[in-house]
Image (tube, rainbow, N blue to C red):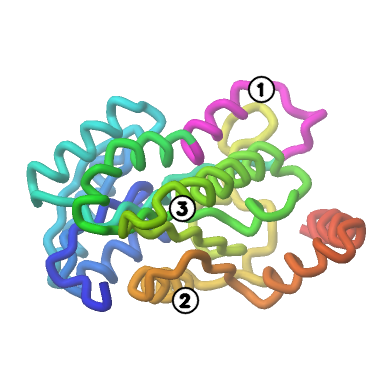
Amino acid sequence: MASMQGKTVIITGASSGIGEELAVVLASRGANVVLAARREEELAKVAKRCEEAGGRALSVPTDVSDQEACRKLVERTVEAFGSIDVLVNNAGVTMWGRLEDVTDLSMYERIMRVNYLSAVYCTYHALPHLKARKGMAVAISSLTGKTGVPQRTAYAASKHAMQGFFDSLRVELLGTGVDVLVVSPGFVATPIRDNALGPDGKPVGRSRRDESQDTMDVHTCVAQIVRAIERRDREVVMTAKGKVGLFLKLVAPGFVDRMALKAMKTR
């Protein structure tokens, strides 16, 4: 996959943020991009950007928390382009609030469905096509999928589930020609935290952290993802702090917990 020319890529959560920019970059390399998200008008705008970049784009309005919708997404892709080379499970929603302050526990189920089960649904239905093309399943996870973060219990749980699912799937697929890539960004400049769910299960409307500090721009993030796809890597842990944190978690887990708590109190 050093060249994406003519490859077909499904991207969930493609209406903004990482998904949108990834779609445009892959389209500029000649890929057929299939854009999935709920917001039809926003998808149309992204599709136009992809076509202007030189690729072919298909918008498929999809509620990825619905298994049947994910099946239809895969079906529409194969009908349009005949195959699937890469599936990027990028759809996600986050939250902000201490467990004891939560008044709507259904938020946990919603986040698990969007962040984790959507990836299970899409990967399950796409897998026969990925095997036929010796393709790649990509999970856009988070550093929060590696270590716990206070006030984001639902989000961290969903990303830990995603990490475990794709690590296990990678082993199952040994020898089939299908590779599995898990991407773990830190804070990236996207709208996801503006749309975070509060303790009442409703969007908070704005990020609760200082976005000018320790935030990667989306273009840098996407460049790392594209490089990892082309190299068929198994994992990308973004940022030096993220890599150091994972090492410290092995040797000094209590220290990492205290640092995480301190960091969240200052944001």
- Graded by Cα atoms within 10 Å as few (under 14), some (14 to 19) or many (20 or more), the crowding at tag 1 reads few
What residue is rendered at 48% in x and 51% in y?
171
Note whether 246 is above or below 99 in the view shown.
below
Please report whichever mark, 2 or 3, sits nearer to the chain's N-terminal start: 3
Which numbered marker is on residue 170? 3
**Label 3 sits on what residue type?**
Arg
What residue is rendered at 86% in x and 55% in y?
257
Does residue 77 appear to the left or right of 137 in the view shown?
left
Which numbered marker is on residue 220? 2
**Label 2 sits on what residue type?**
Thr
Does residue 249 appear to the left or right of 181 in the view shown?
right
**Label 1 sits on what residue type?**
Leu
Please report whichever mark, 1 or 3, sits nearer to the chain's N-terminal start: 1
Which numbered marker is on residue 105? 1
Image quadrant where residue 109 sits: top right
Q: Mainly helix, strand or loop, the magenta region?
A: helix
